[in-house]
Image (cartoon, grey):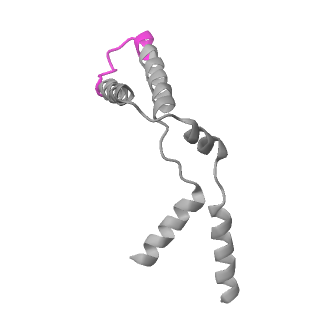
Amino acid sequence: MKRLRLRILIGVLLLASVVLPIQAERANKRPAMTHTDSLRSIAIAERLIEIKELDKSNLKASEKKALRKEVREIKKEDRANGGGLYLSVGSIIIIILLLILLL
């Protein structure tokens, strides 16, 4: 029984050490979001909602293609501006385990 607990603990610690260095490196070099960036992000989100709510059944193939291209460009721009919160698999497992133990 003690060996099983030890193996589980070692497994969790090994998983906790797995991170994606590219995302962590990029997050450190990103400047703080300005007011204009946040306004642009809101505008991007509103445009994406408009596109999702649009009735695409009566559009031509070329119009649908243009919308898909616009969505891709918007998402690319939003990823470049926003970044986000990145969690490693190990940290997610540890968080879940802590929640189970505490609750």
| Residue 56: quarter of image | top left
| Residue 25: quarter of image | top right
Q: Residue at x 49, y 32 (%)?
A: 79
Q: Residue at x 64, y 82 (%)?
A: 5
| Residue 42: quarter of image | top left
Q: Does the magenta stretch include residue 61?
A: yes
Nearer the observer, 38 or 18: 38
| Image location (x, y in percent) of residue 17 | 66, 60
Image position of 41 with respect to 6: above or below: above
Image position of 22 with respect to 5: above or below: above
| Image location (x, y in percent) of residue 8 | 64, 76
Q: Residue at x 32, y 25 (%)?
A: 43
Residue numbers of the magenta segment = 53-64
Q: Residue at x 41, y 18 (%)?
A: 67
**For the C terminus, which image quadrant?**
bottom left
Nearer the observer, 19 or 54: 19
Image position of 97 with respect to 40: above or below: below
In the image, 97: left or right of 33? right
Image position of 24 with respect to 15: above or below: above
**For the N terminus, which image quadrant?**
bottom right
| Image location (x, y in percent) of residue 82 | 45, 34
In the image, 85: left or right of 40? right
Nearer the observer, 71 or 79: 79
Q: Is residue 14 magenta?
A: no
Q: Which residue lies furthest to the bottom in this view?
A: 1
